[in-house]
Image: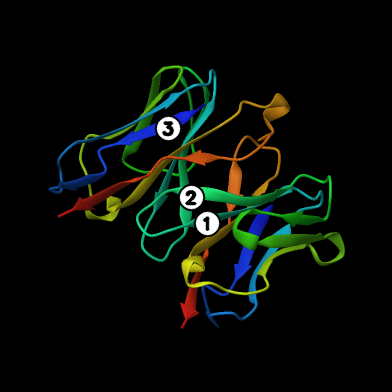
Amino acid sequence: SQTIHQWPATLVQPVGSPLSLECTVEGTSNPNLYWYRQAAGRGLQLLFYSVGIGQISSEVPQNLSASRPQDRQFILSSKKLLLSDSGFYLCAWSENGLAGAVTGELFFGEGSRLTVL
Amino acid sequence: AQSVTQLGSHVSVSEGALVLLRCNYSSSVPPYLFWYVQYPNQGLQLLLKYTSAATLVKGINGFEAEFKKSETSFHLTKPSAHMSDAAEYFCAGDFGNEKLTFGTGTRLTIIP
């Protein structure tokens, strides 16, 4: 069966420090991968998604970046965190469908709560 | 523009009462539609999905939703609320662009 692992679960970082959140998926190949951010009272914001190794699409301009060095690994990074980067970060995967369609559901990790002080 | 709108950021119902969470979409072509639930400090999990096979969709935990093209709606219902239903609920649409578009969420509170 497929599983998704996301870490760290909780992170407290000072403003200006770097960030690395990692997500890996097991039990499937060539998945679509997604990073979402959930700020308090603001729903889910799609940050990045990837349909293959080295293919990253950015949804919003920000000081975050994403990389997909391996088929089932997705990393969210920042060189210098801002206060506004605080939030709950969710990694998710889906089956890679035809013609860009999401064929089924998204499977989410347990989330990483980032607090920037 | 293609979008999903959830009416009511907070909904409170008494235990045993009907749960109704509203979702509308905006698109010239009906999308695939999903309802997800999120418990505190956890990721989201799928409740149910509409993929054009049937307009009335049954999901987990006694929830169901009905797709109504004429109303561009996909409202989520449960006949009798349980304390364990307290969570945040997200409606989402797949408009064929490699990603889901989520609504802003509805926080459901159950009153004992």
Q: Residue at x 58, y 74 (%)?
A: B81
Say what secondary structure mark 3 lies in: strand
Q: Residue at x 19, y 36 (%)?
A: A18
Figure disc tally: 3
* B36 left or right of A14 in image: right
Spatial distance from mark 3 to mark 2, Cα to Cα? 12 Å
Determine the chain carrying the residue at label 1. Answer: B
Res. B104 visible in picture: no
- Residue A3, horizontal then vertical, whole percent: 45, 30
* A77 left or right of A97 in image: left
Q: Is residue B52 above or below residue B70?
A: above
Q: Which mark is residue A97?
A: none
Q: Which mark is residue A4?
A: 3
- Residue B61, horizontal then vertical, whole percent: 59, 59
Determine the chain carrying the residue at label 3. Answer: A
Q: Nearer the viewer, residue B60 or A23?
A: B60
Q: Nearer the viewer, residue B8 or B18?
A: B18
Q: Amino acid at mark 2?
A: Leu
Residue at which label 1 appears: B37
Res. B45 visible in picture: yes
Marks 1 and 2: CB-CB under 8 Å?
yes
